[in-house]
Image (spheres, grey):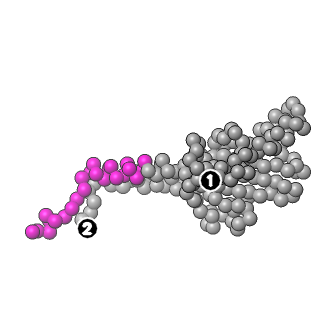
Amino acid sequence: MHAANTQRTMKPGGLLLIKTTFLISFVSASNFWCYNCSSAQSGCGPPLDIRTQHWRYCSGVPVYEQMCVKIIEKVNDQITITRGCLSDLLLTTQIRLDVPRVRRHGYCLYSVSNQRYLQQHLRGPELALWAMGVLRPETEMYKLYCFCDDWPGCNPTSTPYLSLLLLIITAVLPLGPFPSL
């Protein structure tokens, strides 16, 4: 046999199928990756250090809306930030009972217990400003849940561009046959 006859090449349609499968699998799984840490850990405080904190796969209970969550809790003078997946956080009873019922991308809402407190003690425009997250006095204790689902790892303070990079790499791969092995 000649060496020319033993070369294997892939048809352009096969490579296109592989690229499409890769792209679809990444896009469908992209909402299931979030930062998962607490501000007690180095690099997870208000300025998130993406060199020490990495995305983690959300493996908790399946929920209709898979989202990343950032919980900002203020007790006395200490602010604690917890980042994680909604599905993983819902496994904890304390969080499951306290997480706001309205969960939408870009919303930062107070915990259920904090909302009850506000409704009992505030009225009118002041209550509306509190409920929307506009007012946060320095002396009060609160727990704020921020939700996002527009890109993997969307619960930091900085924006990762991995999905855009993978989309570009997938788009520029040649459609021609693979080189000989």
**On the rendered structure, is 4 left or right of 104?**
left
Quarter of the image with the N terminus in it: bottom left
Sooner in the amino-acid sequence: mark 1 or mark 2? 1
Give the magenta range. 1-24
Report if the CB atoms under discs 1 and 2 are less than 8 Å apart.
no
Q: Which residue is mark 1?
A: 88
Q: Which mark is residue 14?
A: none
Q: Which mark is residue 181?
A: 2
Residue 82 lies in magenta, yes or no? no
Across and down, in percent, residue 22 comes to 40, 52
Seen at 13% across and 64% down, the residue is: 5
Seen at 90% across and 38% down, the residue is: 121
**On the rendered structure, is 32 left or right of 52?**
left
Q: Residues within 10 Å of mark 2 (few under 14, many from 20)?
A: few
Quarter of the image with the C terminus in it: bottom left
Q: Residues within 10 Å of mark 1 (few under 14, many from 20)?
A: many
Alpha carbons under labels 1 and 2: distance apart? 44 Å
Residue 154 visible to an observer of this rendering = no
Residue mark closest to the camera, 1 vs 2:
1
Q: Nearer the viewer, residue 11 or 21?
A: 21
Across and down, in percent, residue 113 comes to 80, 44
Residue 88 visible to an observer of this rendering = yes
